[in-house]
Amino acid sequence: QVQLVESGGGSVQAGGSLRLSCATSRSIVSTRLMAWFRQAPGKQRERVAAITSGGITNYDDSVKGRFTISRDNAKNTVYLQMNSLKPEDTAVYYCAAGTYNYDYWGQGTQVTVSS
């Protein structure tokens, strides 16, 4: 069992930045998949960024060029740097991890962007 704990959410004005952190309960060196998802009110959960154990990243088109996912294996932590935030980025952001599927999820952290 892997526990994931997100932090770093909050309220920010449009154009601002936030950095989310996801601390894991065990080593992530061999964790094949790690990602950030988000869910806005009334919408389905969507994956915004993912990173493999080899460091390959993938982004949803809506956040390309603005968000950066990274992982620090020594700290067992995954980050999501979010710049140039827009009101449409408002959502609960979740960290997820797994081998072939996202089997483990955090409790989520709220990000609110005001115009």
Image (cartoon, helix red, strand yellow):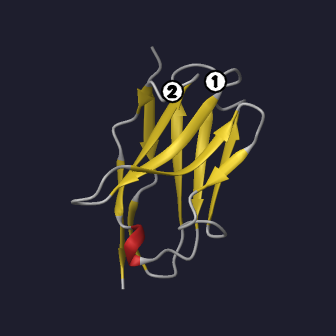
- In this rendering, is residue 99 above or below 10? above
Residue 81 in percent (x, y) is at 60, 59
Residue 4 in percent (x, y) is at 45, 31
In front: 54, or 79? 54
Numbered badge on residue 31: 1
What is the number of callouts on the image? 2
Q: In which quarter of the image is the C terminus?
A: bottom left
Residue 42 in percent (x, y) is at 21, 59
Asked whether the residues under the numbered discs 1 and 2 touch, taking CB atoms below 8 Å apart as contact, a structural biologist would say: no
Closest to the camera, between mark 1 and mark 2, is 2
- Give, as a three-letter code, the residue at label 1: Thr
| First-in-chain label (1 vs 2) | 1
Q: Mark 2 points at which residue?
A: 101
Determine the secondary structure under disc 2: loop
- Point 60% across, 44% down: residue: 50
- Point 62% across, 69% down: residue: 66
- Give, as a three-letter code, the residue at label 2: Asn
Q: Which residue lies furthest to the right in this view?
A: 54
- Point 71% across, 24% down: residue: 29
Q: Which residue lies furthest to the bottom in this view?
A: 115
Quarter assignment of residue 1: top left
Q: How crowded is mark 2: few (under 14 residues within 10 Å), some or many (20 or more)?
A: few
Determine the secondary structure under disc 1: loop
Q: Which residue lies furthest to the left in this view?
A: 42
Quarter assignment of residue 3: top left
